[in-house]
Every structure is written in C-alpha cells, then in structure tokens.
C-alpha cells in the first residue's frame, strides 16, 4: 500500500467515526425541525424545516419549569460536592493520616452503588420529612454519585500539584494562609473547575431519582419531564416537541464538553489508569 | 516530641477535613440501604400502610420463586455481556486507531465526546424515534414497512444494546487510549526487531501491557451496564420481556408502591452488583490503588 492510499484510508476511517458519533445527534436535530406530518415521512431529513417546535416547547410551562429545576438542582449538588470533596481531597493528597485509603475506598465503593436500590427508602423518608418533590430532595441523593466523582478527580489533581511551592513561599516570609491562597489556590483552580464540570454533567444526566422522587413541576428535572412529555400542543406529534426539548438540553452540555474536552478527558482517565 | 505533636495535629486535621465528605457519602447510601434491608422484611404497600406486617424473609422467597425475576436477570445479564464485549472490542480498535494517527486524532476525540456528553434519556429517545415505525427513518431506509422494532423481544433488545454501545464506547476507548499511552515504546520496537507481526505484537505486547486499563474499563462498564434503566424506560417500559432488574425494582417500589417486596428486589440487585464487583476485582486482579488515582 502506498503512503497516499494509507492516508486516504485513515481519512475515510476518521470520517466514518465522526459520522458514527454525530449521526444520532443529527437525527434528533433533524426531527426537531420537522413540521406537522413530516414527522411520519420516514425520512431522515425534514422536507421543509421550521423552528415552531422550539417556540412551542419554550411556551410549555412543563418544560420551562423543568429546565429551571434541572439547572438549580444540578448547581446545588455540584456546589456542595465540590466544596466537601475539595476539603477531603486536600487532606488525602497533602496530610498524613490513617484512614485516607479508607476514605478513597469508600468513594470507590459508593461510585459503584446501584442508585435504584435506595430509591424506595428515600421515597418513603422524603414523604415523611417533606423533602419529596423539592430541590434538596433531589440534590441530596445526587451526592451519592457526585461526591465520589469529585473526590476522585480532585484527589488525582491535588496529588500532582507542586506543594513545595507552598513551603518556598513560607520560607520567603509569607504566612501559611497567604502561601495557600496566593500560590496553591490558583494552581488548584483548573482541577476544581474540571471536577465541577464533570459533576454538573452527571447531575444533569440523572433520570432515576428525577422520576422517582418528584411528582410535579416543583422539582421535576428535564430528563424526567421528557418522559412525561406528550407534546407542546395537540396539533403536533410529541416526537418533534420532545426532540426540540432534547436539543435544548443537549446543546449546552455538549458545548461544555467540547470547550473543556482536554480537561474532561484527563479528569475522566486520571487515576483510572496507573501512571 | 515536637514532631509527634505535629503528626498528631496533622492526623486530626486530616480527619476533620475528610469527615464531612465521607459522612455525607455514607448518609446518602449506607443509611437508605440499611433502611431498604429493614423494609424488605415487611409486607408493606404504601396504598395500604396500616396492613404493614413483619414477614421475615418471605419477600425474598417470593421474588426468588418468581420466573419474572429470573427472566429479568437473564435479560440484564444478556444486555451486559453483549454491550460490554462489543464496547471493549470497538473501544480498543478506536483507541489503537487514535493512538496511531497523529492527524485527525483531535477531530475523532472531539466527535466521540458528543455521545459521551449527551443526556442518556435524550439518546434513548433519539434511538426510539429513529426505529419507531411511526416517526423513524430506519424502516424507510431498510424497506421494512411497518415492522415494529419495539414489539418483539429480540429486536427491541437489539436497539437497546445498539444505543448503549453508541453512547458508552467513547468512554471505553478514552480509558483504553490512556492505558495505551502507558505502554513503553521500546517494548514495541523490540518485538518488531524480533520479527513479530502486527497481530502478534497486539496480543503478546500491547494487550498484556494494557491489562490494568482493560480491567478498569471492564469493571466500570459491567457495573454500569448491569444497572441499565434509562433506555429500558424510554424505549419499551419493560414490555415484550425487555425488563431489566433495575426497572423491576423501580416498578415495584415507585409504580406499585410495594415498598416491602420492592425493597427485597433492591437488596437483591445491590447484592448482585456487589458480587459482580468482587468477582471482577478478584478475577482480573484489578489494581484498586491504580483506580483510586494513587500514584
């Protein structure tokens, strides 16, 4: 095989992979642009595209409320997880204390936990204490998967930091707090950002808790709302409306993933493979 | 003397900082799990709460004697085996390709992050609408007329597996690519010098050196696949014998509000996940120190 043929082969393979990755997304976008009966045309592309489905979903209170809930609840659990995890990760990476392996082991075990198993007791408990169908009622159970993830990503990041710089700053006359704030916090910031993005993605993606622990617009998140969506108006097939809503919730996260791809890839794989 | 005191202080600070996160993790998982264990010993439906009655292990006997439970276990195991093995092979091929090509690697990596980043319910809807005879294009393209993909067990499971594979192969390939980067280049060169073919180099050099990364990928993906729920909910809601164990637990606890029986299913699901995790960790001798990011 000549070099040119080889190059052509690799280009074809690359295009194939890109098509594989993007085709289902393109399909959802295409579906969301279809008008009326075009949904049933059994064709990939719309014959005549329209933005009506988008206008319709944004006029649907079910969807706009869910969007607000999703953003609020995901931010809430991301904030709590990242703060708690940063403290723990600092201790694990920086301090000698017995039980730090145990803390990491717990995080790992919790990450493998089947969340559906605790839905029943939470369902009952939340009804009794009034957390059923509220923001904290979802943000708290989210900690079961967001905390291990944050601890894991942050510990891997903090371990790579040049902590000697902190000592050096103290030698140069800085106080311990100054050294920490002026030297270490800026170095740690990218890792914290990575953990926050990944945690937000996981919270945003939740479906099990979303459908089990909510019943109304008060706290229902977008993935849960999609499952109950029956169309923005009686004149439209629900598929087109669901597709439009799906695109709306997909675009921001995909954009986030693509913008921060380097960090996300290293955050996901750091620690997963022994270096 | 001073070092002893410093060490003690460090120890106390370490615990103080790690305690809130650790406590939070245990409160949101271990506590409800124990609660589930407790509930599973009662005959208890929310719709008839006054009739709550202690029945010991009878709920477990009921579940384990029910063919539906075993059918759901079989379905879940089948989906797990099919998806994880396809993902491993495809993910490895993708990782090897990305490792080899310098040009195009960025494009490929960017593209495959899209399936990874997409919300799983959205992906499930996309696949459902594509294959549905009402809204889809697949039947049009394949000339299948009104074939109902979700009306039969095997075709429904095939679409479910395809969607899972599409969404999670990128994650597997990124894990494996990171593992591939750890394989020393000299090993390859040495094997090439000794006249090993590309196929031999893959089996004798690359794969053994990547064992830790492969083991981690298998562990994570198997546990994840065994919990399959979102796709089942969106595509079939468990109809046509496509119900997974997670879906059974959801249906008993939330839909039927049979907290006693449902909790028994939840506990059994938890135990099977634990069993799988232990089997893989022991069997593949997964280096958990590596998993935890201990360098």
Image (spheres, rainbow, N blue to C red):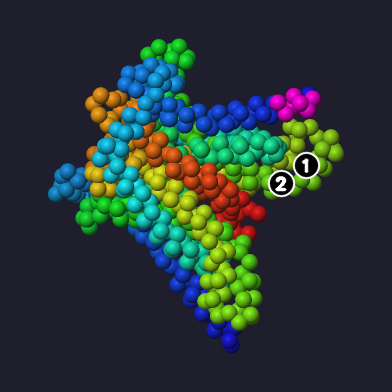
Residue B43 in view in this figure: no
Instruction: Please tell me which residue lies in front, B2 or A199.
Output: A199
Residue A23 in view in this figure: yes
Q: Which mark is residue B183?
A: 2
| Residue at 61% from the left image edge and 28% from the top image edge | A15
Between the C-alphas of marks 2 and 1, the distance is: 8 Å
Q: What residue span does the magenta drawing correspond to?
A: A2-8
| Residue at 70% from the left image edge and 26% from the top image edge | A8
Q: Which mark is residue B188?
A: 1
Quick check: is A5 in the magenta stretch?
yes
Instruction: Please tell me which residue lies in front, B35 or A220.
Output: A220
Image coordinates for residue B235, horizontal then vertical, percent: 37, 29
Image coordinates for residue B237, horizontal then vertical, percent: 33, 31
Label 1, secondary structure: give it.
helix
Q: Is residue B4 left or right of residue A228?
A: right
- CB-based contact (under 8 Å), mark 2 and mark 1: yes
Dot 1: few (<14), some (14–19), or many (≥20) neighbours within 10 Å? some
Instruction: Please tell me which residue lies in front, A59 or B44.
Output: A59
Q: Is residue A109 left or right of residue A239?
A: right
What chain letter is assigned to the residue under label 1? B
| Residue at 85% from the left image edge and 38% from the top image edge | B194
């Amino acid at each position: 095989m000549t070099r040119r043929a080889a190059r052509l082969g690799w280009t074809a393979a690359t295009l194939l992979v890109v098509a594989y990755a993007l085709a289902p997304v393109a399909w959802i976008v295409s579906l969301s642009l279809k008008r009326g009966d075009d949904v049933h045309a059994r064709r990939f592309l719309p014959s005549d595209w329209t933005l009506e489905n988008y206008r319709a979903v944004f006029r649907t209170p079910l969807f706009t409320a869910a969007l607000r809930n999703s953003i609020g609840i995901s931010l809430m659990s991301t904030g709590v997880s990242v703060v708690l995890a940063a403290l723990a990760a600092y201790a694990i990476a920086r301090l000698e204390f017995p039980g730090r392996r145990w803390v990491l082991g717990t995080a790992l075990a919790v990450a493998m936990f089947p969340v559906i198993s605790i839905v029943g007791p939470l369902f009952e408990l939340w009804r009794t204490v009034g957390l059923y169908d509220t923001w904290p009622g979802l943000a708290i159970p989210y900690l079961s998967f967001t905390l291990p993830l944050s601890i894991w990503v942050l510990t891997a990041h903090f371990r790579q930091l040049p902590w000697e710089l902190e000592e050096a700053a103290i030698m140069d006359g800085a106080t311990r707090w100054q050294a920490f704030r002026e030297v270490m916090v800026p170095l740690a910031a990218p890792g914290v950002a990575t953990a926050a993005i990944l945690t937000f993605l996981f919270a945003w993606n939740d479906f099990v808790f979303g459908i089990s622990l909510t019943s109304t617009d008060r706290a229902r998140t977008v993935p849960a709302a999609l499952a109950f969506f029956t169309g923005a108006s009686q004149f439209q097939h629900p598929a087109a409306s669901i597709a439009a809503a799906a695109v709306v919730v997909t675009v921001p996260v995909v954009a986030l993933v693509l913008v921060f791809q380097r960090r996300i890839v290293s955050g996901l794989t750091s620690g997963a493979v022994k270096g | 003397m001073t070092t002893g005191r410093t060490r003690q202080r460090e120890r106390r600070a370490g615990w103080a900082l790690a305690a809130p996160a650790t406590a939070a993790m245990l409160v949101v998982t271990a506590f409800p799990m124990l609660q589930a264990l407790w509930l599973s010993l009662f005959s208890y439906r929310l719709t008839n709460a006054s009739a709550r009655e202690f029945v010991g292990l009878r709920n477990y006997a009921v579940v384990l004697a029910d063919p539906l439970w075993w059918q759901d276990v079989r379905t879940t195991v089948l989906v797990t085996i099919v998806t994880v093995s396809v993902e491993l092979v495809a993910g490895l091929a993708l990782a090897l390709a990305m490792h080899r090509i310098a040009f195009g690697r960025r494009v490929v990596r960017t593209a495959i992050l899209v399936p990874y980043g997409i919300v799983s319910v959205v992906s499930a809807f996309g696949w459902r609408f594509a294959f549905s005879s009402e809204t889809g294009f697949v039947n049009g393209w394949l000339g299948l007329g009104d074939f109902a993909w979700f009306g039969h067990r095997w075709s429904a499971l095939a679409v479910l597996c395809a969607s899972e594979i599409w969404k999670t192969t990128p994650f597997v390939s990124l894990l494996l690519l990171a593992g591939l980067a750890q394989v020393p280049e000299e090993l390859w060169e040495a094997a090439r010098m000794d006249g090993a073919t590309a196929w031999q180099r893959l089996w004798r050099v690359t794969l053994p050196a990547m064992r830790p990364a492969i083991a981690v990928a298998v562990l994570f993906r198997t546990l994840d696949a065994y919990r399959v729920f979102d796709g089942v909910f969106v595509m079939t809601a468990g109809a046509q014998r496509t119900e997974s164990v997670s879906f059974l637990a959801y249906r008993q606890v939330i839909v039927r509000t049979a907290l006693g029986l449902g909790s028994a299913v939840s506990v059994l699901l938890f135990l099977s996940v634990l069993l799988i995790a232990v089997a893989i960790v022991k069997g593949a001798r997964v280096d958990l120190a590596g998993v935890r990011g201990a360098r």
